[in-house]
Image: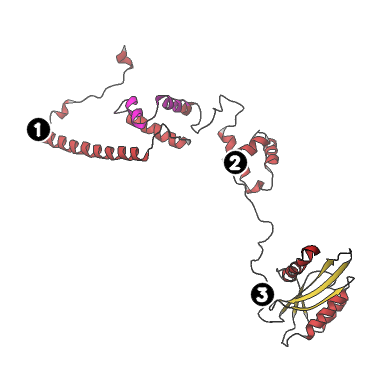
Amino acid sequence: MDWLRADNKEVVSLDVLDSDQSQLQAEVLKLRARVKKLRSVLRLLAVLLNVSGFNLVNQRLPEERQKLRVLRAIDHARKTASLRTVLRVLGLSSARYHAWRRLQEGCALDDQSSCPRTSPQRLTLSEIRTIKQMVTSPNYRHVPAGTLAILAQRLGKVFASPTTWCRLVREYGWRRPRLRVHPVKPKVGLRATRADETWHIDTTIIRLLDGSKAYLHAIIDNFSRRILAWRVAESFSPGNSVAILVEAAKGASKSSEPPAVLTDGGTENINSHVDDLIERGVLRRILAFADLKFSNSMIEAWWRVFEAPMAIPQHAR
C-alpha cells in the first residue's frame, strides 16, 4: 500500500523520441553548458559561505519574514531534492525546521520565549504593538509609562501592569517623543557696534564677615566691557541707580542717539527718577526678556567674576 501514499512521479512521454538525432544532440549540448554554468555558480557560492563563516546552526533568524523566505526556498528545492539533502545544504537541523513549521501553523514565527496560545498570561504581538504605538505616540508624550498602562486598561486596549510596560520599553529601546517647552537659548548675546551704544545696569548684594549687607550698583558698557560707574550703599535705594546713571551719562561720547540701558524689572530700574532721565532724552531703557529676547547676563556674569575672590577664606588668600 506504499504506492498509495507515495508522490506521483514525473512521466516522460514518447514525444522526445520523435525528435531527430541532431536536434537531440543540440539540446543535450545546451543542457550540459547550463549545468556547467550552474556548477560554477554553486561553487562560488559555497566558497563565499565558507569564507564568511555563515551557518544557520549558529545564526538566529528572529524575524518572521526571514523564516518564511527560508521555508519557501525549502519547499521549492524539495521538488528536485530530498528534504534531508536540502537541510544539509542549508546547515539547518531537522528539529529546527519542523519547529518552524509548527510555529507557522500555530502562531507567529517571530522569536518568543513561549507561544502566546500556550501561555495565556503572555502578551500577544498585537498587544505589544499597541503598547509601542501608545508609548511612541506624540499624543501621550506627557503621560508617564505607569500612568499610560492604567489608561490603556481603562480604554480596554491592553491589560498589563506598569512594570510590564517599563520592561518592554527598556528591552525594545522605544524612545518617547519629546517637545522642547522653552525656546532654544541664543548662542550669541547682544553685541554693540560702538562704545556707549548699550549699557547694562544691575545691583548685587555682598554679605560681609560681620553678617551685614552691602548693596553694589554698577554699569558696564557692552562694547568695551568697561565699568562706567559704580556705588556701594548700606541700604537698597533707587536713588543710587539714578546717581550712577547720571555719572555714566556725563562721560558718555556724543552721538545722535542716547545710550540704551538694558535693565531687569527691578524697582531700582523702574521708578519715577529713572523715567525722568528717559523723558529728558538722556537715556533709553530696554527691559530684558520684555523689549528684546536677550537677558541682562553681561553685568550678571561680571558679578560672578567679582564675587569669586570674596568667596575664598581669608587665611587662604
Calculate the distance from the C-alpha at mark 1 to the C-alpha at mark 2.
Answer: 68 Å
Amino acid found under the numbered disc labelled 2: Lys
Q: Secondary structure at mark 2?
A: helix
Name the one closer to the observer, 52 or 95.
Answer: 52
Place of residue 116 in the rendered image (x, y in percent of width and height, measured from the top left): 56, 28
In the rendered view, would you say 4 is above or below 258? above
Magenta segment boundaries in residue numbering: 78-102
Majority secondary structure of magenta residues: helix
Mark 2 crowd level (few <14, some 14–19, many ≥20, 10 Å Cα): some
Task: Find residue 302 and report its horizontal and vertical position in percent.
Answer: 74, 70
- Residue lying furthest top in this view? 1
Q: CA distance from mark 1 to mark 3?
A: 97 Å
Is the C-beta separation of discs 1 and 3 under 8 Å?
Answer: no
Which is closer to the viewer, label 3 or label 2?
3
Kindly report which numbered mark, 1 or 3, lies closer to the viewer in this rendering: 3
Q: Which residue, given by chain and number where applicable, does mark 3 sit on? A: 191
Residue underneath mark 2: 132
Is residue 311 rendered to the left or right of residue 133?
right
Question: Mark 1 Cα within 10 Å, few/some/many (few <14, many 20+)?
Answer: few
Q: Secondary structure at mark 3?
A: loop
Labels 1 and 2: the sequence-earlier one: 1
Q: Earlier in the sequence, mark 3 or mark 2?
A: 2
Residue 88 belongs to magenta span: yes
Residue drawn at the location 63% of the way across and 42% of the way down: 134
